[in-house]
Image (cartoon, helix red, strand yellow):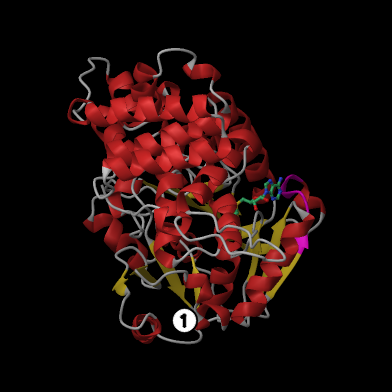
Amino acid sequence: MKSRGGGNTGTSRGNRNKKPQQKQQQQPQRKKTAREVALDTLVKVAEAGAYSNLQLNRALQDAQLSRQDAGLATELVYGTIQHQRLLDERLSELVTKGFNKLTPWVLVLLRMSAYQLLMLDRIPPHAAVNEAVVIAKRRGHSGISGMINGVLRNMERSLAELKKPLVIADPVKRIGITYSYPDWLVKRWIGSYGEAVTEQICAAGNEPPHSSVRVNPLRLSRDKASTMLAEASGGEASVEASRLSEHALIVSGAGNLAGTEGYRTGLWSLQDESSMLVAEVCAPKPGMKVLDCCAAPGGKTTHLAELMEDRGQVIANDVHPHKKQLIEEQATRLGLTSIQAVTGDAAELASKFEPNSFDVVLLDAPCSGFGVIRRKPEIKWTKSAEDVLSIAALQEQLMDEAAKLVRPGGTLVYSTCTIEREENEHQVAKFLERHSEFKLDAKWPAQVLRPLQEAHAIAEPFSGMVQLLPQQFGSDGFFIARLTRQ
Ligand SMILES: C[S@@+](CC[C@H](N)C(=O)[O-])C[C@H]1O[C@@H](n2cnc3c(N)ncnc32)[C@H](O)[C@@H]1O
């Protein structure tokens, strides 16, 4: 399994063996270890429904871990959530009584330790067990640490057996348990994509995501940005041109890219490659009037303005008042002045703006998000089939409203970061039934189509919409449709 960025695999014993300092006025707070940071984050995600990426970022900032330890904490948080079903399956065989009644932190500690034992070959099993017992002794009574010690030692003894691939005849159960996805979702995807592709989707969803930057073409070339990124990392980073977008660079080993000088001064933005295709498919020209209906935090808005050479007007709307500032911050960082951020419900935009008045309208709709499971693995466990239905109903409403604002001959681009047909192809098909004045538009920019054709990611003849799956390019799963108003 690929790692999410190295990480210290050692134990925390070194710290605890230091002699306590005498006569100190105030005992300095003991620094949390990587495993404690991961445990606290996982408990908050499980108990309070926090988003793993936001919660982890906050925890890492507070804990001030070394880069290696931050790598380990990140690996543990994502890996434990991603493989939760398989870990629970294995643990429930060893916790003989009351697996479902365990206190949340105990359950999470067991899962996190089982993840290290079963999935991370670079962590010595005895280190994973010892560290779990140390944490358990700090947090609970001796009965709990004894139980944790017993369960994990049993697991350690049976590792060879437990690591063997599961033999299960039912494909839904086999894929669901092996890759840790809920049955309802696996069943749905097998219905949409078939068993083999579903297995690839599920495996890809457990891989660490690439980090990619979108180079600001108004400021520098992609080659120049590539050199600068490599230099900024002291030669440690690997920087490669993206296959999918001519504005994208894939960067690994450069640490926190939001901390780079080039990011701060607007030379580049952080965005997934497939997400970059959306503005490119919009293909706006300088001087145009463009509306981004669901714009925050402004990734695609700022890309649209860059492609328009910051000439014309980009109205960036979002329903949440506090998100207006996020869009404005991104525009300011990139030095873009053609963006106007506004707050409003996209279901009511036609009463706010003149109908039929925009050259391009982008609806990057709220969605179930199953294309970004690599970044937010908890959505496997928090979203339901009912959520897909209710979000699809909202998307339908927003599409109808967005359509009213497109001028005759203008373009409507609909996108989501999910792979649910109900929210994507079926949504577009139903829209076209309701709106005979719109047609799918297959005339996409050549630089967008070429890599998709080369990878056979689109059927020929091209219909004007694409469903990118995470295993095809190692990007997020994304859906994009381009429609033209007759
Ligand atoms: C997929 S995200 C947009 C991401 C954004 N386009 C970007 O590239 O940075 C969807 C956004 O829709 C917003 N949203 C949800 N419901 C909305 C509504 N009814 N009207 C307008 N915005 C809405 C959410 O606040 C969220 O920021």
Give SS at disc 1.
loop
Q: Residues within 10 Å of mark 1 (few under 14, many from 20)?
A: some
Q: In the image, is residue 228 above or below residue 481?
A: below
Taking the view exactly as shown, the residue that stands out farthest to the right is 351
Q: In this view, does 396 lie to the left or right of 469?
A: right
Question: Residue 346: within the magenta?
Answer: yes
Q: In the image, is residue 161 above or below residue 58?
A: above
Residue at 67% over, 38% down: 397
Residue at 78% over, 53% down: 344
Three-letter code, disc 1: Pro
Nearest the viewer among 16 and 107 is 16
Residue at 23% over, 32% down: 196
Image quadrant where residue 467 sits: top left
Q: Residue 410: x and y, percent?
A: 58, 60
Taking the view exactly as shown, the residue that stands out farthest to the top is 97
Q: Residue 314: x and y, percent?
A: 66, 69
Q: Is residue 118 left or right of residue 412?
A: left
Taking the view exactly as shown, the residue that stands out farthest to the front is 23
Residue at 56% over, 44% down: 40
Residue 312 visible in image = no
Nearest the viewer among 170 and 484 is 170
Q: Residue 382: x and y, percent?
A: 55, 32
Q: In this view, does 165 lie to the left or right of 19?
A: left
Q: How many marks?
A: 1
Nearest the viewer among 371 and 308 is 371
Q: Residue 235: x and y, percent?
A: 31, 82
Specify start and end residues of the magenta stretch as a single range. 342-347
| Residue that badge 1 annotates | 217
